[in-house]
Amino acid sequence: MTRHQLVDQIFQKRTYLCVGLDTDIDRIPRHLRDQPDAVLQFNRQIIEATKDHCVAYKINTAFYEASGAKGWDVMAQTAALIPDTHLRIADAKRGDIGNTSAQYARAFFETLAFDAVTVAPYMGADSVRPFLEYTDKWTILLGLTSNAGAADFEMQRVLHRSTAGIESAELALDVSTSSTEHLYETVLRTAAGWGSEENLMFVIGATQADSFSTVRRLTPNHFYLVPGVGAQGGSLRDISKAALTADCGLLVNASRAIIYASEGEDFADEAAAIASQYAFEMAGYLPGSPVV
């Protein structure tokens, strides 16, 4: 899916919601659990109920990989259920040396036919490049995550220096904060040059709302995949105010708040109701027409 196609869907539907299919067999309604292909049945009903209110689905691969070969099969079948009008995201957080990354890219972009995959950037450009080589596919790089552990590395300050047009960063020791930046800033600024605004997104956690102005300054036109709204407490209003662009530039993900809205037989209807609420709020934040 190209950026133009994604933006077109966002403004047609007036929503930038991504529904996370982080399906846990222990949390789906009890009347489904003993049935064959329970997870697939659950996912099918969620997709059918929410597809008019969102533009993307994010499959967290860990929830499927945990079930071995059968889980991979359910993941592939779930991806096939997602309409072509929606971005299919594999939340796999891959990242390894180049030839291994090439196989990861092949797995998600060819075998499983996803449109996008999340990738960890900390092994550098050569570990990400194989994903970026695919036409009309998206690499979604971890930028600033919503977990508490982001403080361990991403929020640490590093020394930033620019000499003769060559930028470098090293661990800051006994220097003032005026000469440093957060490590996530170095990652964003550097990685933005690996791809383009047409094939590279960044994961920016919704619970990091105070940092969104800095993030947008560093990557003014890139799309962000924003987890952490809903069950994790991120504010859709704050994120939208800080990071929306003329052509939206956001995919805001909600998983548990939508797919587990009800434990009863009405789970799909309740999921649709919550997704509709998100979409209604998003419509109020979107500009009137895109600039593409």
Image: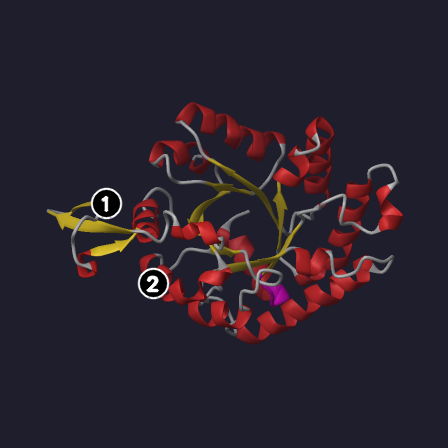
Direction left: furthest residue? 164
Magenta segment includes 15: yes
Relative to 205, 110 lies left or right: right
Calculate the distance from the C-alpha at mark 2 to the C-alpha at mark 1.
20 Å
Q: Nearer the viewer, residue 220 or 143?
A: 143
Q: The residue tagged with tag 1: helix, strand or loop?
A: strand
Q: Do the residues bearing badges 2 and 1 touch, measured as CB atoms within 8 Å?
A: no
Kind of residue at disc 2: Thr
Magenta segment includes 264: no
- As drawn, the label of residue 171 is 1
Relative to 60, 139 lies left or right: left
Give the quadrant of the C terminus. bottom left
Q: Is any part of residue 35 visible from this angle? A: yes
Name the spot of residue 37 as percent of width and height, x first: 82, 38
The residues colored magenta run 12-16
What residue lies at 82% left-to-right and 41% top-to-bottom?
Answer: 38
- As drawn, the label of residue 214 is 2
Vertical arrangement, residue 211 with respect to residue 121, above or below: below
